[in-house]
Amino acid sequence: MNQHERKYLLLEVSENIPEDFRTELVKLRSIVSSLDVDAPEVDLRIVIGNAWEKNPMLYYKNIRRDGIDIWNWDGTEDIDG
């Protein structure tokens, strides 16, 4: 992976998460985005609830079409794209 590649990550969390946990999610997002100029760009979207599944935005369409559910990933798909 080179510096010009971009990885898209979608983290769906429950609508019932406590408010202080939401603050931690903001911290997580900043940690995932590296300051290293040679690192690939990572675009982490954090969504609360599953409304994104019906969202017509291109980003979410691409996730629905090409995304890999890492919680259920069996190792057969190329996760590095």
Image: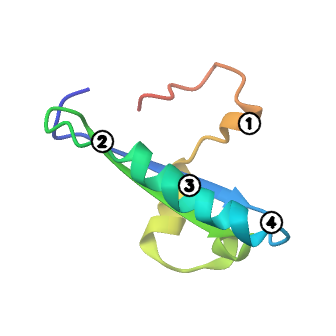
Residue 35: which quarter of the image? top left
Which sits earlier in the primary sequence, circle 2 or circle 1? 2
Q: Name the quadrant of the N terminus.
A: top left
In the rendered view, does 61 fall on the left or right side of 47?
left
In space, the residues marked 2 and 1 are separated at their CA atoms by 23 Å
Q: Name the residue: 52% across, 48% down.
A: 66
In space, the residues marked 1 and 3 are separated at their CA atoms by 12 Å
Q: Which mark is residue 17?
A: 4
Q: Which residue is mark 1?
A: 71
Observer-nearest of 39 and 20: 20
Q: Position of residue 34 (x, y in %)?
A: 30, 41
Residue 74: which quarter of the image? top right
Disc 4 residue type? Answer: Ile
Judge whether 70 appears above or below 31 on screen: above
> Neighbour class for label 1 at 10 Å: few (<14), some, many (≥20)?
few
In space, the residues marked 2 and 3 are separated at their CA atoms by 17 Å
Residue depth check, mark 2 versus mark 3: number of the one nearer the observer: 2
Disc 2 residue type? Answer: Ser
